[in-house]
Amino acid sequence: MKGLKVLIVDDEPLMRLSMLDALEGIGCEVMAAATGTEGLTILGTRQFDIVITDLRLPGADGLTILKACKERSPTTEVILITAHGSVDTAVGAIKLGAYDYITKPFQMDELLLIVERVGKILGLRRENLELKEVLEDRFSFGGILGRNHQMRALLEKIKLVAATDSPVSIVGERGTGKELVAHAIHLNSPRRDQPLIKVCCADLPEALLEAELFGHEKGAFPAALRQRRGRFELAHKGTLLIHDIDAVSPTVQARVWRVLQERRFERVGGREPIEVDVRIVCASTDDLREMAHQGRFHKDLSEQLTAVQIVVPPLRERREDVLVIAEHMLEARSAALGKSLDGFAQLSRDLLLHYSFPGNVGELEQMVECAAALGREGESLQPWDLCGFQTCPYLGGSPQAGCGFCAEGLTAKVEKPESAAPATLATAREAFERDYIAAVLKQVDGSRTNAATILGLSRKALWDKCKRYGLSPAKGEAEEKEE
């Protein structure tokens, strides 16, 4: 157990020295204290993987050390040393969070075996944390989730592009998450501390769009009752996200191109040039290069904006991401609603995986929001929760015209299982419990002591469940006695 940081608290000099030598012999980094008060002082200055403490100590007793240790470092495991007459107290201490206890007199090998088991559990915890960090780093960036190879390539491209100051063109269908990509680029760029300003061109007529982008002077047109700064000015030193730039008129396209060329512009109705330093990120449903080739977009502007182009794939082309995104959304939405929901039922998962999602991630988000609102506390989300129709075919009703699942015929393709009689809730719980206990036992090489700690059970309770479900003991534990 090389590298484990261990604190020994014991008032018997010979015992303390023997444990210190034995633990250092297996590669542990060990500190020792002769009193409970000294042990508490050391705990206040350093963090340990394991604390081994006698139950009866001068100053503060072992239970006080246990409580202080769990308050300061919940991941630190505590092993208690006790005499025969204090076994009941030690068992009570396990309920307070102690890992295990050992009764005097004991062989040093017994203690080392417990330390070795703790070391394995701590190692598994670290591996799980590292794996989680790797997965989060690999499959998400700036709120964008994806395991699909196209998304992994997209995430890598975003990381590279973000560090530059080049204009970026983001192309994708409605609802694919183009704005998330723009946010990720800005928040990971040198301009991250400056504003990200957005404008949606499709929502504004040409005259208003020009004033929105470049601002206007007082009296520039009848409604211009005062001077107003435009989005380019507001985005100075930051990033300007132009949504639906493919819907912009040729006149406005030409003005945007001039701003990129000259880094200056005049407000509508103004004559004073305004210097501006802005990074342009634009989003469109059509490829600007193809539009320029067809004569539908300013050629020079297209060349500037598409020097870096990011294509966001539709959700139907990355089905392996559907459940990843849906579960992430559900976790966030259920937390916001203060509800505890048991994920998606298998039938719902099958439907989500088969559906084409014409509205992409935006449509999936609406489904999850609906399901979170309609789902019952502690239960899995069903198809009728996702679509919001209480006359869903899966409830015996007819197909609904407004339901995407019904429109694509998925209610016939993904049938509700009928071959086996539905299990009772008690039967389903037992099956899950047996499988889960078996999985944990396998993870800890069959050690019931370690498994009991992970499962939050006493060793006696775990022993009873293993007998009930026919789970065999680990080698060397067959003779373990019930308490």
Image (cartoon, grey):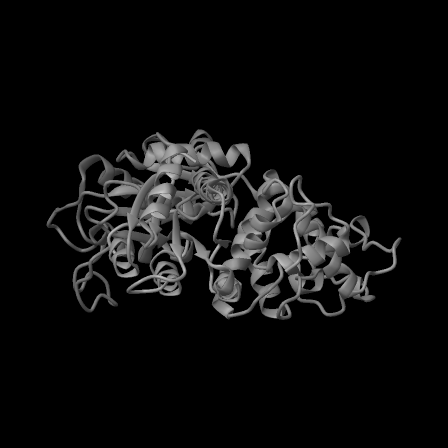
Rendered residue at 41%/44% (across/down): 181
Against 263, is 334 above or below? below
Rendered residue at 38%/43% (across/down): 19
Quarter occupied by the N terminus? top left
Q: Position of residue 2 (x, y in %)?
A: 40, 34
- Residue 133 placement, left or right of 380: left
- Residue 68 placement, left or right of 395: left
Q: Position of residue 454 (x, y in %)?
A: 55, 53
Q: Position of residue 157 (x, y in %)?
A: 40, 32
Rendered residue at 68%/55% (across/down): 463
> Which of the two residues, 87 or 316, is positioned nearer the viewer here?
87
> Which of the two residues, 277 or 392, is positioned nearer the viewer here?
392
Q: Position of residue 424 (x, y in %)?
A: 80, 64
Residue 288 visible in the shown view: no
Q: Residue furthest left?
A: 272
- Residue 220 placement, left or right of 189: left
